[in-house]
Amino acid sequence: MLTRKQNKHGDTIPHSSVLNAFRRADIFAQFGFVAESIEDLLDSNKAKRSEYLPWRVVRIQYPRFMRSSFVQPLFSHTANRITAGVKLGASITLLVSKPRQRLAKIARVVQATTQIYQNTRAAGLGQDGADQGLVVQQAGQLVASFSKPGSKMERSASLFISGQCILSYFTSGYVKLISPVWRSGDAMIGITRTVSYGGVEFNNLMVRYPAIRKAIAWSVIIGEVSAPVMVFLPTPIRRIWQISMVTMHISIAIVMGLNRFMWAFASFHPILDETVRQFLYKPSTLPMLESWAKFRRLK
């Protein structure tokens, strides 16, 4: 039986809103995992590099038995491609299956297992914020899928994902804020000049118009640093901020080719909305915000 939560007007909000939030977030995340798996399966240049990096470097930090001839085949390029295929199958299953059903739970455990394998093989080398964001979403979804509706475990998963979202944005923005290169806007020249993340036309635009590059840099800084404040502001303002951040990720995907960033960070926002709803309608979720929630209800 679905649990229900009481809002400030005495009405009730069905637990289906929580399920829908996790489902929407999971759809975004699974598209990210699908893109990641396809890259592992089809990128020939990446395939050639992975034969040497990262495993041949990473294994040095592991115990001696991890460097033995018996373990080596388990982390070979062929084994990694098989794992990527299994992850792709699990991701597609999670996209088409009903959430929190037995098949979805099995697929989620399989996907988490393949992620642990790939993280062990990579040990962070060659990974970026999109990989870490997808892992955060995966961990939260795994906990929520095995939790009872409305339970503390489910709310903890929601808080975890939302907290990581705010922390990711704020730390990224703070690092840019204390950087003179970012404050001046010159970082945009350096980024767009690179082969991996740049483009001739966009780089020429950044070089030619200092005001544009500075405006872009500061819009990113302000958007990211303001993340913790947005949780406490009215819903319309938070919606504008969320739309602006997702738009930023889409722009980054188009200009820099970081497609998985768009899926990874877009997956945070549906659960962030639901977490704010929990604070407003059920402040006991986080006692330190109980006074703030009462103040909002009185207004």
Image (tube, rainbow, N blue to C red):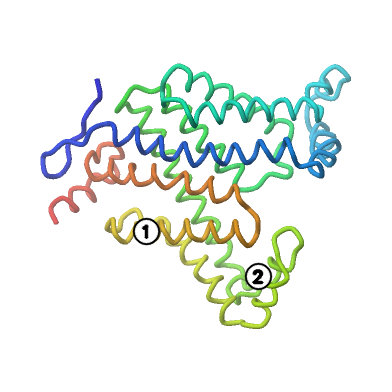
Which residue was labeled with disc 1?
A: 229
Extreme right residue here? 69
Which residue was labeled with disc 2?
A: 187
Look at 69% across and 66% down and name the residue there.
Answer: 191
Please indicate whether residue 16 sits to the left or right of residue 28 in the image: left
**Dot 2 lies on which element?**
helix
Please indicate whether residue 71 sits to the left or right of residue 251 in the image: right
Q: Position of residue 244 (x, y in %)?
A: 44, 61
Q: How many marks?
A: 2
Which of 97 and 143 lies nearest the eye of the viewer?
Answer: 97
Look at 32% across and 26% down and name the residue there.
Answer: 151
Q: Position of residue 211 (x, y in %)?
A: 57, 82
The answer to whether marks 2 and 1 mark residues whose Cβ atoms lie closer than 8 Å is no
Which class describes the residues within 10 Å of circle 2: few (<14), some (14-19), or many (20+)?
A: some
Please indicate whether residue 166 sits to the left or right of residue 177 in the image: left
**Dot 1 lies on which element?**
helix
Look at 46% across and 25% down and name the residue there.
Answer: 97
Q: Earlier in the sequence, mark 2 or mark 1?
A: 2
Q: Looking at numbered disc 2 in the image, what kind of residue is underneath it?
A: Ala
**Image vertical order of residue 147 relative to residue 281, above or below:** above
Q: Looking at numbered disc 1 in the image, what kind of residue is underneath it?
A: Val
Report which quarter residue 153 is drawn in: top left
**Image vertical order of residue 104 relative to residue 42, above or below:** above
Q: Position of residue 263 (x, y in %)?
A: 53, 46
Extreme left residue here? 10
Report which quarter residue 14 is drawn in: top left
Point out which mark residue 267 bears.
none
Which of 40 and 118 lies nearest the eye of the viewer?
Answer: 40
Report which quarter residue 159 is drawn in: top left
